[in-house]
Image (cartoon, rainbow, N blue to C red):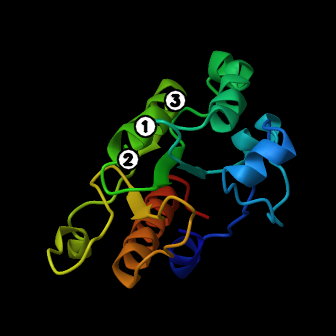
Amino acid sequence: MAEGARSAGAQVDLKRVPETVPPAIAQSAHFKLDQTAPVATVAELENYDAIIVGAPTRFGRMPSQMASFLDQAGGLWARGALHGKVGGAFTSTATQHGGQEVTLFSIITNLMHFGMVIVGLPYSHQGQMSLDEIVGGSPYGATTIAGDKGQRPPSALELDGARHQGMLIAKTANKLFPV
């Protein structure tokens, strides 16, 4: 996503939300614990022209950490601070049928309540229609299938989809917020 957004001239900040799960449980559940990205704050969201939310699937929806973070943005919602900004979502699941689209919708629903303009992954990225290999992707956002222990890296087609969506989000933001 970041690479695609940068290719369209966007400045990109990579952030993560605070972890709420005890370390022992997170480790046994194969959480990615070696994150180097700084922790995001709700207050800084209104400073961005576009916000792309990525989260793994937990039981067919976004994880509680992300839901908690977005729930804390009620003040931004009340002020309309995110109205008209561009939003998008991406996710990963353990299996092909692990809830990719429901997870994307659980993220997108929040973004729409904030009044954001949603950009998904249209079929201009035709790789998501491939029948030659297992591949993630949905018109609602880029996805990947990670395996039950995170052992499968995103495929070339999945990475191309993420880049494409990131580029489209940045181009849309550039049109709405010209420099």
Give the spatial CA distance, label 1 vs label 2: 6 Å
Q: Disc 1 vs disc 2: Cβ atoms closer than 8 Å? A: yes
Q: Nearer the viewer, mark 1 or mark 3?
A: 1
Which residue does the image show at 32% across and 61% down from the upper left?
Answer: 137
Q: Earlier in the sequence, mark 3 or mark 2?
A: 2
Image x and y of residue 174, in percent:
51, 62
Given the image, on which type of amino acid does mark 2 rest?
Answer: Gly
Residue 156 appears in view: yes
Relative side of 155 to 50, left or right:
left
| Label 2 sits on residue | 98
Q: Amino acid at mark 1?
A: Gly
Residue that carries the numbered disc 1 in the rendered image = 60
Label 1 or label 2, whichever comes before in sequence order: 1
Quarter where residue 109 is shown: top left
The answer for how far apart the CA atoms under marks 3 and 2 are is 20 Å
Q: Secondary structure at mark 2?
A: loop
- Tell which tag, 3 or 2, sits nearer the viewer: 2
Task: Residue at 50%, 58% (x, y): give it.
Answer: 148
Q: Residue at x 71, y 60 (%)?
A: 32
Which amino acid does the dot numbered 3 rest on? Asn
- Please state the horizontal and vertical placement of residue 78, each as a whole percent of the image: 66, 15
Q: What whole-number distance in Å separates the C-alpha atoms at marks 1 and 3? A: 16 Å
